[in-house]
Image (cartoon, rainbow, N blue to C red):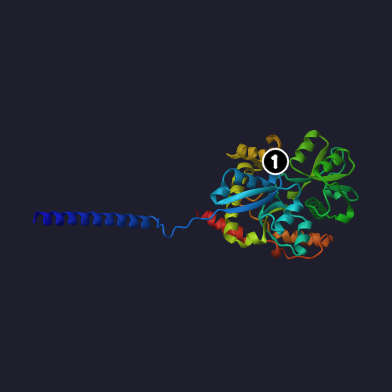
């Protein structure tokens, strides 16, 4: 009898332990569900590898910042940088799928490449001419009697290459002041150092130069500005390009653009904020300058003289793309006419910014 009673008590005790354990498990499960911790529905974002082609230029600053500050890692992206020595090979590599993302200037060669059947999309800002910010200027020798663009009629103007951003800016500046490229002689000099040397030796009457070279020329005393491009025209100088394949992977493309937008905001707030007409260095000014200096192998003092303007959210000046296409076509520099909608995609960045704002 005692054995039966002992067996019964032992069985009941074991059952109570099982029920208690089930109750605790049930409560933990309910608690997890209330806190959104249902393990059966939780999905981990897969890390994506992205190849980016770029130049060691100050205008690549947001990409440098995103890498150094872990913005790409925050979006589960592994970025592999491929460095290039010139702009056009980046566009070619992006269109051919050798890199997923390209960051470089927007030129006639790029438009001709797209007109020839290559596919890529311009999705975000990487530098533009903006009123009130020194970026690119028409310069003349210090002792020149040329005082304004209209005085350049019949003169020689140095540019980098035919069909380049410098060619476009020269042409548009002339037109804004009642002239055309037919009224001057455009002289391709192939490089920025070539432009500076030719200005100093006064072998041409004027050249276009960008920062920090404008400031360096003025400090050395052999040139002066007669017009800032951004004070005369709106111009999307360079952009972020996506290959067709990469753009089609919208989820990963938007993750990239979220990281990029975080970086453009970080850059803008550090180096482009103004009080009145003066730029006021932000909290992260020194850090941003140091990052750019490290990636471009330049001294911080030089970087500070040439921080290019770009939209705070990386938004493309998309209307200007058609303006560029039309101008290059008019000048006989495009082989096929294009519609900007074939090469521009602003929806991906819009969606990325929307998601960024809701986080």
In the rendered structure, the answer to whether residue 178 lies left or right of residue 307 reads right
Residue 272 falls in which quadrant of the image?
Answer: top right
Callout count:
1
Depth order, front residue of 144/272: 272
Element at badge 1?
helix
Percent position (x, y) of residue 294?
66, 38
Is residue 126 in view? Answer: no
Percent position (x, y) of residue 241?
68, 56
Residue 348 falls in which quadrant of the image?
Answer: bottom right
Query: Height in image: 238 above or below 293?
Result: below
Q: Would you name the residue on which mark 1 appears?
A: 296
Query: Height in image: 236 above or below 203?
Result: below
Percent position (x, y) of residue 45?
51, 55
Q: Characterize the local packing of mark 1: few (<14), some (14-19) or many (20 or more) Cα atoms within 10 angstroms.
A: some
Q: Who's the residue at 64% across and 47% down the image?
A: 63
Percent position (x, y) of residue 102?
69, 53
Furthest-left residue in this view: 1
Q: Who's the residue at 21% across and 55% down the image?
A: 14
């Amino acid at each position: 009898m005692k054995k039966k009673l002992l067996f019964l008590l032992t069985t009941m005790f074991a059952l109570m332990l099982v029920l208690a354990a089930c109750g605790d498990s049930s409560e933990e499960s309910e608690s997890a569900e209330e806190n959104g911790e249902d393990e059966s529905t939780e999905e981990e974002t897969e890390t994506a590898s992205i190849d980016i082609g770029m130049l060691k230029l100050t205008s690549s600053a947001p990409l440098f910042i995103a890498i150094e500050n872990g913005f790409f890692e925050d979006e589960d992206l592994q970025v592999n940088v491929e460095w290039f020595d010139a702009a056009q090979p980046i566009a070619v590599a992006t269109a051919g799928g050798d890199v997923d993302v390209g960051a470089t200037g927007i030129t006639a060669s790029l438009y001709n490449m797209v007109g020839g059947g290559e596919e890529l999309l311009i999705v975000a800002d990487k530098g533009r001419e903006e009123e009130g910010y020194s970026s690119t200027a028409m310069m003349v020798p210090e002792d020149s009697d040329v005082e304004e663009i209209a005085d350049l009629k019949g003169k020689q103007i140095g540019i980098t290459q035919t069909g380049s951003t410098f060619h476009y800016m020269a042409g548009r500046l002339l037109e804004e002041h009642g002239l055309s490229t037919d009224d001057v002689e455009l002289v391709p000099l192939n490089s920025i150092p070539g432009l500076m040397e030719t200005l100093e030796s006064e072998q041409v009457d004027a050249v276009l130069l960008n920062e920090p070279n404008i400031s360096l020329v003025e400090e050395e005393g052999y040139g002066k500005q007669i017009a800032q491009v951004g004070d005369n025209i709106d111009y999307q100088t360079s952009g972020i390009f996506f290959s067709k394949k990469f753009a089609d992977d919208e989820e990963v493309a938007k993750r990239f653009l979220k990281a990029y937008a975080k970086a453009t905001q970080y850059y803008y707030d550090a180096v482009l904020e103004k009080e009145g007409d003066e730029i006021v260095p932000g909290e992260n000014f020194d850090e941003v300058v140091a990052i750019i200096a490290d990636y471009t192998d330049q001294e911080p003092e030089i970087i500070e003289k040439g921080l290019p303007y770009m939209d705070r959210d990386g938004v493309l000046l998309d209307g200007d793309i058609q303006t560029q296409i039309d101008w290059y076509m008019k000048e006989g520099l495009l082989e096929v006419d294009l519609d900007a909608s074939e090469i521009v995609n602003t929806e991906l960045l819009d969606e990325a910014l929307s998601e960024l704002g809701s986080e």
